[in-house]
Image (cartoon, rainbow, N blue to C red):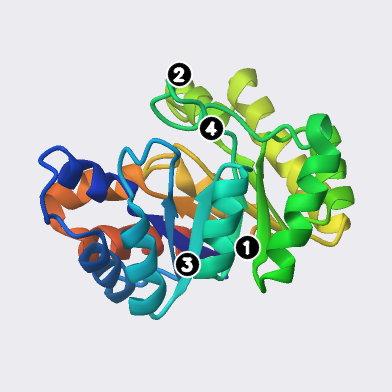
Amino acid sequence: MVQLGVNIDHVATVRQARRGAEPDPVRAAHEAELGGADGVTVHLREDRRHIQDHDVERLRAGINVKLNLEMAATDEMVAIARRIQPQISMLVPEGREEITTEGGLDVAGQLPRLTDIVSQLKDGGMIVSAFIDPDPAQVDAAAEAGFDVCEVHTGPYAASHARAGGDFLLADLDNAYREIESAGERIRAAGMRFNAGHALNYHNVQPIAALDGVAELHIGHAIVSRAVYTGIREAVQEMKRLMTLASR
């Protein structure tokens, strides 16, 4: 059954707007657990725009599900990950001016460096994941670099889904979906775990959750947005229900 990793970055975004103590991402993580989350994801950015170092430390010590730490492939972040030891470290591209992650990691273009970083993280006892576009060359490079997991970037699919109103008879949406499906098959054939995420919401999640062999979806903004009205626990329960129905 496909698992749900809940990204709680934007709980910290609200907190950082006032540089205060609330809302507390750790409390949000506990609510997500009670709602059925199988994991918690946070992105510790270079500019610390939302999640802070102490958040990651407290989450690692205080939650009962796996912690997935999204991070840039920098010496600073490798050192932090090796010290805190989340269960999963996921390497993502990062730009100072971007609002959110805008594309997949170019594993093929920086293979020697990423191979070294993967080795360092694995030596620290972590599962190592790459956030990549559904590009065969990137899947093959991720396997060569030694990644355990590939999370396929679903942002273009989500944008196509919105433009098409969810109608898969429109070629743009169908093609975006088939690219993810094909990437997933290639990832699994290479012996890696197939995850997916980015811009998934309550309207577009089920076709992705229904893909053969997808192990885990990482979803944040949609759940935190829904939680403004319903609370995090109920928002997670609703997302998990949709995913479970699709993956049966």
Residue assigned mark 3: 67
Element type at mark 3? strand
Q: Secondary structure under badge 1?
A: loop
Distance from label 1 to label 3 (Cα)?
Answer: 16 Å
Mark 1 or 3: the one toward you: 3
Tell me the residue at 79%/34% (across/down).
110
Which numbered marker is on residue 163? 2
**Dot 2 amino acid type:** Arg
Q: CA distance from mark 4 to mark 1?
A: 25 Å
Residue 112 visible here: yes
Q: Earlier in the sequence, mark 4 or mark 1?
A: 4
For image coordinates 78% across by 60% down, the residue present is 119
Is 45 on the left or on the right of 176, as rendered?
A: left
Q: Are marks 1 and 3 in contact (CB under 8 Å)?
A: no
Query: Alpha-carbon neighbours of circle 2 within 10 Å: few (<14), some, or many (≥20)?
Result: few
User: 136 above or below 60?
Assistant: above
Q: Are marks 3 and 2 in contact (CB under 8 Å)?
A: no
Tell which tag, 3 or 4, sits nearer the viewer: 4
